[in-house]
Image: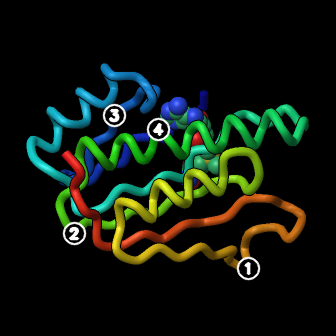
Amino acid sequence: MEWIRPLDEENFYTVRGDFTKDETLKEVKDLINGTAQVVISDAAPKLTGIKDIDTIRSTDLADNALTVCDHVLMQGGNFVLKVFQGGEYNNIINNIKERFKVVKTTKPPSSRKASVEMYVVAKGFRRMF
Ligand SMILES: C[S@@+](CC[C@H](N)C(=O)[O-])C[C@H]1O[C@@H](n2cnc3c(N)ncnc32)[C@H](O)[C@@H]1O
């Protein structure tokens, strides 16, 4: 896994860890000590070149990012997610729709046409528990 370089700003904190692990999520929760206004995931798996495997791994990461929302996102909060189309993609979108008032998918011009990646913008989180 590649790590993001820490930034020097006073109001910027970095947690280095696998966000699918409970201990990383706990570290994030302890750090923000409350709820977050937004969760953004640009996470992607290390590509194998085998489409089915890469897609399943991407949708699995997306599912875990949604779990992060369940734990830290405030009522009415927003979520931005990168996820590959295919595999569990439709289920992921449906799960996001269950939790957010407005859900839009987009493919920005910077994303290669041949790539299956999509970006999801979800607004108005409804806390389920
Ligand atoms: C497309 S890159 C994101 C690049 C990032 N937006 C940047 O500008 O540096 C995908 C990143 O997801 C990270 N990643 C994949 N699975 C992860 C996980 N379970 N926990 C934390 N990061 C993960 C990878 O290490 C990789 O750095």
Amino acid type, residue under disc 3 in the picture: Val
What percent of the width, then of the height, locates residue 65?
45, 44
**CB atoms at circles 3 and 2 under 8 Å apart?**
no
First-in-chain label (1 vs 4):
4
Taking 105 as reference, is 125 left or right? left
Residue at figure coordinates x 60%, y 66% from the top left: 119
What residue sits right under mark 2 in the picture?
Answer: 76
Q: CA distance from mark 2 to mark 4?
A: 20 Å
Q: CA distance from mark 1 to mark 2?
A: 28 Å
What percent of the width, then of the height, locates residue 62?
54, 46
Mark 4 or 3, closer to the camera: 4
Residue at figure coordinates x 29%, y 46% from the top left: 70
**CB atoms at circles 1 and 3 under 8 Å apart?**
no
Amino acid type, residue under disc 2 in the picture: Gly
First-in-chain label (4 vs 3):
3
Question: Which labelled disc corresponds to residue 92?
Answer: none
Mark 1 or 4, closer to the camera: 4
Question: Which labelled disc corresponds to residue 15?
Answer: 3
Determine whether 114 is above or below 34 in the image.
below
First-in-chain label (1 vs 3):
3
**Residue 107 location, quadrant:** bottom right
- The foreground one among 68 and 97 is 97
What residue sits right under mark 1 in the picture?
Answer: 109
- Residue positioned most to the left: 33
Q: Quadrant of the C terminus?
A: top left
Question: Which labelled disc corresponds to residue 64?
Answer: 4
Q: CA distance from mark 4 to mark 3?
A: 16 Å
Mark 1 or 3, closer to the camera: 1
Determine whether the beta carbon of the residue marked 4 sits less than 8 angstroms from the nearest atom of ligand 1: yes
Q: Quadrant of the N terminus?
A: top right
- The foreground one among 104 and 80 is 104
Residue at figure coordinates x 26%, y 50% from the top left: 12
